[in-house]
Image (tube, rainbow, N blue to C red):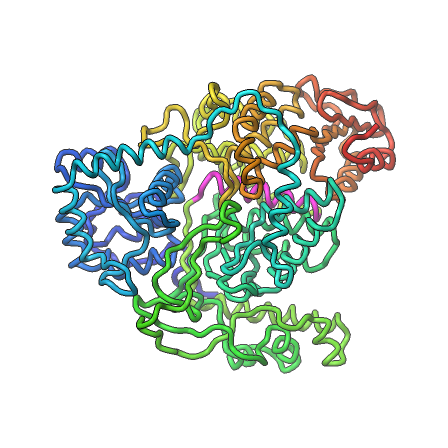
Amino acid sequence: MRRPAGRDTMRQHPPLVMSNRLATETSPYLRQHADNPVDWHPWGAEALRLAHEADKPILLSIGYSACHWCHVMAHESFEDPEVAAEMNRHYINIKVDREERPDLDQIYQTAHAMLTQRSGGWPLTLFLMPDGTPFFGGTYFPKRARHGMAGFLDLLPRVAEAYRDKREEIGRQNAALLDALARTLPAPAGAQELKRSPLDAAVREFAQIFDDVHGGIGQAPKFPHPYELSFCLRRHALDGGELGLSITRLTLVKMAEGGIYDQLGGGFCRYSVDPYWSIPHFEKMLYDNAALIALYSDAWLVTRQPLFERTARGIAGWVMREMQSPEGGYYSSLDADSEHEEGKYYVWTPDEVRGLLTADEYAVVEPHYGLDGAPNFEGATAEGGAGAPQRGDATPERDAGASNARSPASSSRADPPAGAPRPTLRGARWHLRVMKPLEVVARRLDLPLAECAARLESARGKLLAARELRIHPGRDDKVLTSWNAMMVRGLARAARAFGEDAWLASARRALEFIRATLWRGGRLQATYKDGVAHLNAYLDDHAFLLDALLELMQCEFREDDLRFARDLAELLLERFEDRAAGGFFFVSHDHEKLIHRAKPGHDNATPAGNGIAAFALQRLGHLIGEARYLEAAERALKLFYPQLERQPGACVSLATALDEHLVPPQTVVLRGPAGAMAGWQRALAARYRPDALVVTLPAGQAGLPPVLDKAAPAGGVNAWVCRGVTCLPAIGDLADLERTLSAGRHPA
């Protein structure tokens, strides 16, 4: 099969004489702009020095390679010689990939919100003083004024004039901004009693904004919110009651049947623009799918719903087929666009589908995917050259975390304002989603359900093969440590639930890649591409990787993994913890000095590093008996507890760590011959026990810390169950162990 264009890198351009400094960067997003007429610089000392020496303001543009509106602004402005000339005349221009530099993105998104009193997004466009302090900004700007938005070409000289003529006013504003940024750090709360009330409040909060018809937390645009749903499922398992399960189950069903899920190739897109999960924003992110494969696996363990298993298998297939590099690491994302049109790769006409299938196959596919109904996707070309389904052309990309769960901010792409140019219709299309369940189709056709399922599976294979021949969306092929760690954890979790050795092998390949290329001399690097690993790793890289190792050790225990986990835990304490106030900074103590040093506690599209660090340190501390890790986690929880009380739904990663601080996890150590323990391990993995940590240690395993070095029986298997510092006597019968673990959170 031929390899379609556009697969390996994002938005390839013909070779040109490079006019700026981005061609040698590791970020595909920066490379997209390497042949712009803009004199771009990457973020670094050279660009900041030039701004000081030339006494010019900095134009900072932050985006990422799968961002639709970043592409639109690039086409309209950054590729335009007239706009580039103004940028080069007045500014030192800096391009930043928010995925490689989340430290910068966090700071400047927060600063943008303070300056404008509006939510941010991508592309983020800020004007900075030479010291890096922003004084004006926005998100997407069109080249010319429209829809009430200032034109970028008009704005450039005006902001430069303000920089020259209003230094004193800007100086006062900058001082106030820096003071406001400093006040975003959580204040030490002193003696703080930790209670479980935020755990109950979080579920109530989600229930208030739950869509009990179509599923989902909040209204359109709808994001999956996998961490909030995982928290709800955990509360159901540990506390009983149906509310958490109802929220999770309905949402996962509607998502899996919707267009946000790729019905042919597997994997989820980033969000749905409508309340029905029908039409997504088509970019696919590694981190979303990492969280969702773990969530669908856990939900399957609870419900045994076949749809959840099929969905988890679809995610695993997509990740291993399209997102794992030959070296082992996982790529970052797939673009929303192909051939400059959003969604073009994914949509169909009934005639296209009919021409690829047999009549029997089409008889099932047509009603199942709604091809017998009205089209749900209108392919259109709007100003800027981007196709979108009934959407406008002036909304930046945003992430929706729990912090904005009541009114999720995102790229909603609502209809354009009055007077805006309407798109030119280029033909109706259908984006595949389940419209009639297969059981209904089988009854209508008077066929056995198994026969319909076989026809559907055959049809899906043919349609996927045909789609592979299309021009693919671009793929951002950099490897990010934090997102890889999330996928290692997700695939390992799913492998344990379904007993899939191939998934575990994929996760282990990615871990070995990280260890071989991104772990250098006891230091972790944040990103890798084309043989280059660089950038000082962040809190998320360390915390997510520690969490992934704990999941891998439950699949198969390796001494090297435990050693690596301890190294990461030590680095968290040495290089990130604020020993005076508690909690962990996002960047290490020896990181480049920026205008602010964040200590985030809110979850966003990915969980808060402080929450995952506290959770993973506690688990490792209990596993190996290391009190320092438990104490560091407790200091973080006490620091963020007032925030947890105020906004529990915005901090579910911290809430989960709080849960395991109040009631430590059940640590289960199995000892015995490897073959004899395999059945025990499979049996324990077949139940959803979110508060259990199970490690299987074959007889003769050396190098164990004393707390794990239990005596192995001569022939059978022994299990030791501990909760905190309290351990039960050895259990030599699997049924007794199951009863003990199922007895509740406080076994006798």
**Count of labels in the image:** 0
- Along the line of sight, the residue nearer the viewer: 659 or 679: 659
Q: In the rendered view, tell whether residue 9 sits above or below residue 676.
A: below
Q: In the rendered view, tell whether residue 115 sits above or below residue 442.
A: above
Residue 421 shows in this picture: yes
Q: Residue at point 64% right, 46% down?
A: 204
Q: Residue at point 84% right, 24% down?
A: 714
Q: Which residues are magenta?
A: 479-498
Magenta segment, prevailing SS (helix, strand or loop): helix
Residue 531 shows in this picture: no
Q: Residue at point 75% right, 71% down?
A: 449
- Along the line of sight, the residue nearer the viewer: 732 or 633: 633
Question: How far across and down, in percent of the image, does residue 448 sit?
Answer: 77, 74
- Along the line of sight, the residue nearer the viewer: 466 or 394: 394
Question: How far across and down, in percent of the image, does residue 645 sit?
Answer: 57, 36
Asked where in the image residue 644 lies, by quadrant, the reply is top right
Residue 482 lies in the magenta stretch: yes
Task: Tell me: 547 left or right of 113.
Answer: right
Question: How far across and down, in percent of the image, does residue 290 sit?
Answer: 56, 47
Q: In the rendered view, tell whether residue 330 sits above or below residue 424.
A: above
Residue 656 lies in the magenta stretch: no
Question: How far across and down, in percent of the image, does residue 420 sit?
Answer: 31, 71
Q: Quadrant of the C terminus?
A: top right
- Along the line of sight, the residue nearer the viewer: 70 or 34: 70
Task: Tell me: 236 left or right of 592.
Answer: right
Asked where in the image residue 386 lies, by quadrant, the reply is bottom left
Q: In the rendered view, tell whether residue 685 sits above or below residue 433.
A: above
Task: Tell me: 373 left or right of 47.
Answer: right
Asked where in the image residue 647 lies, by quadrant, the reply is top right
